[in-house]
Image (tube, rainbow, N blue to C red):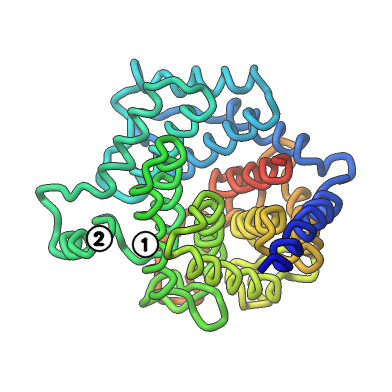
């Protein structure tokens, strides 16, 4: 036992030094500072809160990505701009706050909780917790299936779509980080194990849903990013941690296998004739970067893959600071051609946000 502890004490600093080496020293134009700055300020320039559309989940994640970047870069000007825009939701834009009635809307609470983390202003905490709590508070008009999920200790918003494992995980994990109340992180872990057991296939990847047997890129990206966020804060003594870490590593091994020669991943991951898609690729890159830096993945194997992916992603940002080749918002459908034919947008927030996550992960110590 003593020898093992000694080995770990020696190994972990080596792992950290190696990860710092392979995930730093990027050429001009590719540094996380440059990319983060370009995309964060692009969000401020472009984003207009619409009374008609409200605040979607992709808006939320781009906003929180920009906020995380502002915090890690210590960019006070950017932070103030982001905060001023958000604060209108307490006053003149209050009517467009997302309702607490769907998995895609409740995740908005993670943004409010991120503002609390950065500013320590209590109003953000109260707003964020209201979304985290209602994700587990069964409404009076709940449907039979929602009541069944609730009776078994899961969120009534459970759908068994892989997207959910970021939407649910991020708000519950943030609530735990900001309060220290383990009920939040334990909820997220229990939910993650359910999705792993139901959706992860023997090759480590995930079907979009039980009745849709396709390995959609961004859908798998949500799973990869969700496990990554959860594992960073899940206590070591949580009973579900070994299962989640096993599922994460199994997925990362498969993703490394399917990474294309130029460093990207395809819209349908296991189809080499399908087009390279940026949002899923950026989510996988975020999972690789974080796994290497946290010591969950061997730096010698995954460090070069993470760097290769980042170097491949950056040229997809155009002169307006918009990311190209982003699959539009996508419902599930049991049709391979459906995924091949999905429109590709430029500047879609589904793509902008995970690039910011990568920049932050590269900058964090």
For residue 148, what is the image quadrant?
bottom left
Residue at the image position 45 percent from the left and 47 percent from the top: 170
Quick check: 71 above or below 233? above
What mark, if any, has residue 106 been given in the picture?
A: none
Residue at the image position 43 percent from the left and 28 percent from the top: 49
Residue at the image position 41 percent from the left and 44 percent from the top: 171
Between 148 and 270, the one lying in front of the other is 148
Q: Is residue 119 left or right of residue 313?
A: left
The residue carrying mark 1 is 190
Mark 1 element type: helix
Q: Is residue 343 visible?
A: no
The residue carrying mark 2 is 153
Number of marks drawn: 2
Tell me residue 174's x, y (percent).
45, 41
As measured in the structure, the alpha-carbon distance from the residue carrying label 2 to the one carrying label 1 is: 8 Å
Q: Dot 2 surroundings within 10 Å: few (below 14), some, or many (20 or more)?
A: few
Q: Is residue 293 left or right of residue 161?
A: right
Seen as rendered, the residue at the extreme left is 140
Mark 2 element type: loop
Tell me residue 52's x, y (percent).
34, 32
Tell me residue 199's x, y (percent).
43, 74
Given contact means CB atoms under 8 Å apart, are the residues at marks 2 and 1 in contact?
yes
Residue at the image position 28 percent from the left and 47 percent from the top: 135
Quick check: 86 above or below 261? above
């Amino acid at each position: 036992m003593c020898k093992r502890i000694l080995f770990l004490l020696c190994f972990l600093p080596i792992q950290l030094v190696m990860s710092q080496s392979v995930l730093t020293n990027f050429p001009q134009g590719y540094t996380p500072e440059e990319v983060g700055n370009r995309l964060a300020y692009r969000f401020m320039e472009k984003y207009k809160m619409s009374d008609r559309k409200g605040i979607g989940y992709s808006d939320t994640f781009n906003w929180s990505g920009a906020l995380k970047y502002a915090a890690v870069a210590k960019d006070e000007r950017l932070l103030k701009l982001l905060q001023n825009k958000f604060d209108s939701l307490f006053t003149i834009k209050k009517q467009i706050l997302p309702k607490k009635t769907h998995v895609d809307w409740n995740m908005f609470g993670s943004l409010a909780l991120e503002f609390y983390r950065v500013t320590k202003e209590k109003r953000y905490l109260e707003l964020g917790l209201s979304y985290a709590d209602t994700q587990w508070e069964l409404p009076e008009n709940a449907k039979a299936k929602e009541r069944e999920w609730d009776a078994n200790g899961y969120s009534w918003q459970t759908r068994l779509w892989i997207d959910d494992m970021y939407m649910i995980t991020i708000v519950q994990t943030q609530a735990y980080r900001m309060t220290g109340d383990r009920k939040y992180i334990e909820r997220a872990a229990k939910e993650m194990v359910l999705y792993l057991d139901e959706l992860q296939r023997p090759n480590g990847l995930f079907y979009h849903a039980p009745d849709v047997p396709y390995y959609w890129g961004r859908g798998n990206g949500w799973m990869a990013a969700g496990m990554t966020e959860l594992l960073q804060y899940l206590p070591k003594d949580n009973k579900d941690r070994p299962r989640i870490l096993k599922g994460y590593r199994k997925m990362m091994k498969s993703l490394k296998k399917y990474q294309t020669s130029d460093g990207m991943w395809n819209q349908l991951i296991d189809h080499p004739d399908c087009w390279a898609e940026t949002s899923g690729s950026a989510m996988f890159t975020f999972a690789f970067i974080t796994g290497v830096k946290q010591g969950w993945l061997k730096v010698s194997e995954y460090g070069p893959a993470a760097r290769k992916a980042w170097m491949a992603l950056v040229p997809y940002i155009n002169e307006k600071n918009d990311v190209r080749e982003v699959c539009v918002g996508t419902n599930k459908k049991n049709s391979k051609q459906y995924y091949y034919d999905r429109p590709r947008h430029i500047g879609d927030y589904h793509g902008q946000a995970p690039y910011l996550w990568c920049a932050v992960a590269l900058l964090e110590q």
